[in-house]
Amino acid sequence: MLPAAIPAAAVGLLAQDLVERRLGGPRPTAFLMATAGILLAAADRTPATRSVAAGDLTAAGAAQVVALAPGVSRAGATLTAFRLRGVRREEALRTSLVMSLPVTLGAASLTAARSRRTPAALPAVVAGVASYATARRVVGSSRLYSGTALYRLGLALAVVARLRKEKH
């Protein structure tokens, strides 16, 4: 699974500033959030028939590169890739969480190095524990996917509404 994280790590290291400058505004972020939510909802309707294979890891690695864009969740992108390829929910979730660790740690390390400050450990620990607890609770449940898709769509709509309000 570690090799699947290499493309996102390389692109993140080389192009993260460019990606953030080009796609980091509220409009592109809202669009990407909504698109990711719709794709996740559609992907979860794909029949779950099999375990993760090498081609699935390649697709999920490419999805992690897409997730460098603001508004695209790394876990959501890999889940979408796995589910579109027919991987069972539980295995898609477990593999997605494991795959996201190296890139997430690398991104946090890069951010800390660039800011020359040590990131606060407490938020990272809380986020990790919450992710683990959520994953344990939703295994075998379809609520994660539909809830996540709706959350992303709702958040994107809230951003668009805020932008429209600021415009007037």
Image: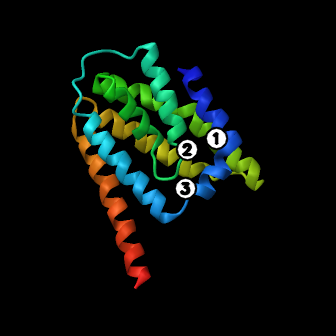
Amino acid on which the number 3 mark rests in the picture: Leu
Q: Residues within 10 Å of mark 2 (few under 14, many from 20)?
A: many
Q: Residue at x 26, y 47 (%)?
A: 147
The disc placed on residue 68 is 2
Tell me: 89 left or right of 18.
left
Which is nearer the N-term, disc 1 or disc 2?
Answer: 1
| Of the two numbered discs 3 and 1 in the rendering, the one whose residue sits closer to the viewer | 3
Amino acid on which the number 1 mark rests in the picture: Gly
State the image quarter where residue 45 is shown. Answer: top left
Q: CA distance from mark 3 to mark 1?
A: 14 Å
Q: Are marks 1 and 2 in contact (CB under 8 Å)?
A: yes
Q: Residue at x 37, y 68 (%)?
A: 160
State the image quarter where residue 7 is shown. Answer: top right
Amino acid on which the number 2 mark rests in the picture: Leu
Q: CA distance from mark 1 to mark 2?
A: 7 Å
- Depicted 35 relative to depicted 7: above or below: below
The disc placed on residue 12 is 1
Q: Which residue is mark 3?
A: 23
At mark 2, the secondary structure is: loop
Q: Residue furthest bottom?
A: 168
> At which x and y percent is residue 168?
40, 85
Q: Residues within 10 Å of mark 1 (few under 14, many from 20)?
A: many
Between residues 13 and 2, which one lies in front from this camera angle? Answer: 13
At mark 3, the secondary structure is: helix
Q: How many marks?
A: 3
Q: Residue at x 41, y 59 (%)?
A: 30
